[in-house]
Image (tube, grey):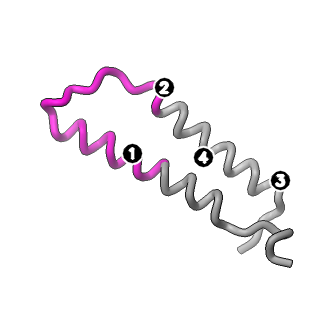
Amino acid sequence: MTHSTAVREAARVIAIEAARAYVANIRPIDLTNPNVLVGHLMSAETLLMDIVAAHTEPTEEAAR
């Protein structure tokens, strides 16, 4: 599915800003608690997957 360039650029900005906000709000992490570590890793992976998806989906201009 292709989207207009404006929509695609907005999705890219939203994905990157979500990752920045997540990192900015991380408190000191209890490194002795594996559940907390796994939670942070899973959240980071999801945010990275969103960033990749936002940058790999074609725009209308690329589909021509």
Magenta residue check for 24? yes
Q: Which residue is mark 1?
A: 43
Q: Amino acid at mark 4?
A: Ala
Residue 19 drawn above or below residue 3: above
Q: Amino acid at mark 2?
A: Ala
Q: Quadrant of the C terminus?
A: bottom right
Residue 3 drawn above or below residue 12: below
Q: CA distance from mark 4 to mark 2?
A: 14 Å
Tell me which numbered mark, 4 or 3, is placed earlier along the sequence.
3
Farthest-out residue, left? 32
Magenta segment range? 23-47
The circle drawn on residue 6 is 3
* Quarter-of-image position of residue 53: bottom right
Q: Which residue is mark 4?
A: 15
Tell me which numbered mark, 3 or 1, is placed earlier along the sequence.
3
Q: Which residue does the image show at 65% across and 43% down from the upper left? A: 14
On the image, the x and y values in percent for residue 23 come to 46, 31
* Quarter-of-image position of residue 61: bottom right
Question: Secondary structure of the magenta portion, mostly?
Answer: helix
Q: Amino acid at mark 1?
A: Ser
